[in-house]
Amino acid sequence: MIPFNISPERASQELLDISRKLGDGLKNLYHMDEIETGVTPKDVVHREDKLVLYRFRAPEDTSRRQSVPVLVVYALVNRPYMTDLQENRSMIRGLLEAGQDVYLIDWGYPDRADRFLTLGDYINGYLDRCVDFIRRDHGLDAINLLGICQGGTFSLCYASLHAEKIRNLITMVTPVDFKTPDNLLSHWSQHIDVDLVVDTLGNVPGELLNWTYLQLKPYRLMGQKYLQMLDQLDDPKKAKNFMRMEKWIFDSPDQAGEAFRQFMKDFYQGNKLIKGELMLDGRRVDLGNISMPVLNIYAKQDHLVPPNASIPLGSFVNTDDYTELAFKGGHIGIYVSGSAQREVPPAIGKWLDERC
């Protein structure tokens, strides 16, 4: 039994401290400027429907730029500015400082007009045309591809079907085996009537998916976080950082119905990627077609994509140049933590330089 030895004076003081922090926090929130995201300067180089392709400007103090550009492919389910959240927490800036020429796909916000978009439309359509645009613009046969989370799975499919267009492939926190025992999201997904969901809703609301992800760790992501918030809101800088992250968490696009149906049934429920049974536009996705160098980066404390879901990739690709990088952190920390800024972008830059 834990003894409670809190004097009335101490309890009163703690209540006063909490009241002061709440008061200061409310003032900071009231006077807070607009929350800016995607802080690195960039240019729109290509548009198609909701999609925007950006090219980031190199920092003035960068002495060189890699001749083979890298295209970053993010997931559909969240916004890609997580990779460029703020100046001192930006994977994009880290890649630029490592000398890389960086492009990024922003998938935009699907609406009812996108209800019948398929995975083939995203991978063999939009993604392929972005790759071709960059290839033409640089006069190259092949470019580098960096896929993140679901975007990494898309990149694996793309590299399998269009191997001649990809020089080096990087996957970050990317699910490959969708039925590992420690994958709670996968366990939940097995019991969903996906056809009923899509046929009823059309596009799947991003808010619905977002709350599903939060329920994976409800105490940490919804309880503990907001208790700790009291120690941040009374500091204007910390308060803004907290709200910037909150903005990203709840900025969740809806999902095109048919693409969601395919992804859930073929990947999570069918695990067809590693079975060699996945079909896109009548073509089989064979990971054995991936013969280019591969760098697979995973997070050791990832609750959305457990390491066991990513590590099997090395057993399925057909390359002698396969490298794994394990990051000591979680699914979000790999983009924004201080240790990630020091470790991950420089490692990617070095790996690409050695192969370009």
Image (cartoon, rainbow, N blue to C red):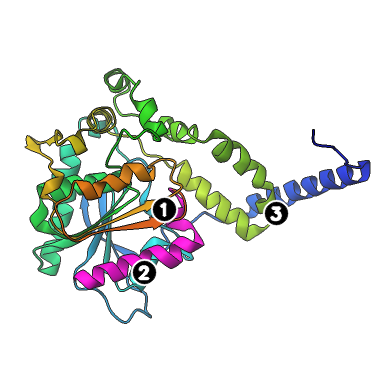
Residue 234's disc is: 3
* Nearer mark to the viewer, of 2 and 3: 2
- Most frequent secondary structure within the magenta stretch: helix
- Which residue appears at 85% of the width and 38% of the height? 4
Residue 82's disc is: 1
CA neighbours of label 3 inside 10 A, class few (<14), some (14 to 19), many (20+): many
Q: CA distance from mark 1 to mark 3?
A: 24 Å
Residue 215 is inside the magenta segment = no
Residue 211 position within the rendered picture, expressed as x and y whole percent measured from the top left: 47, 32
Classify residue 165 by image quadrant: bottom left
**Secondary structure of the residue carrying numbered label 1:** helix
Residue stretch rendered in magenta on the structure:
331-356
CA neighbours of label 2 inside 10 A, class few (<14), some (14 to 19), many (20+): some
Q: Amino acid at mark 1?
A: Met
Asked whether, in this view, residue 53 is left or right of residue 6, the answer is left
Q: Is residue 125 visible?
A: no
* The C terminus, quarter of image: bottom left
* The N terminus, quarter of image: top right
**Secondary structure of the residue carrying numbered label 3:** loop
Whichever of labels 2 and 1 marks the residue nearer the N terminus, that label is 1
- Which residue appears at 36% of the width and 31% of the height? 186
- Which residue appears at 64% of the width and 50% of the height? 29
Residue 47 position within the rendered picture, expressed as x and y whole percent measured from the top left: 22, 52
Asked whether, in this view, residue 14 is left or right of residue 49, the answer is right
Residue linked to disc 2: 346
Asked whether, in this view, residue 230 is left or right of residue 190, the answer is right
**Secondary structure of the residue carrying numbered label 2:** helix
Whichever of labels 2 and 3 marks the residue nearer the N terminus, that label is 3
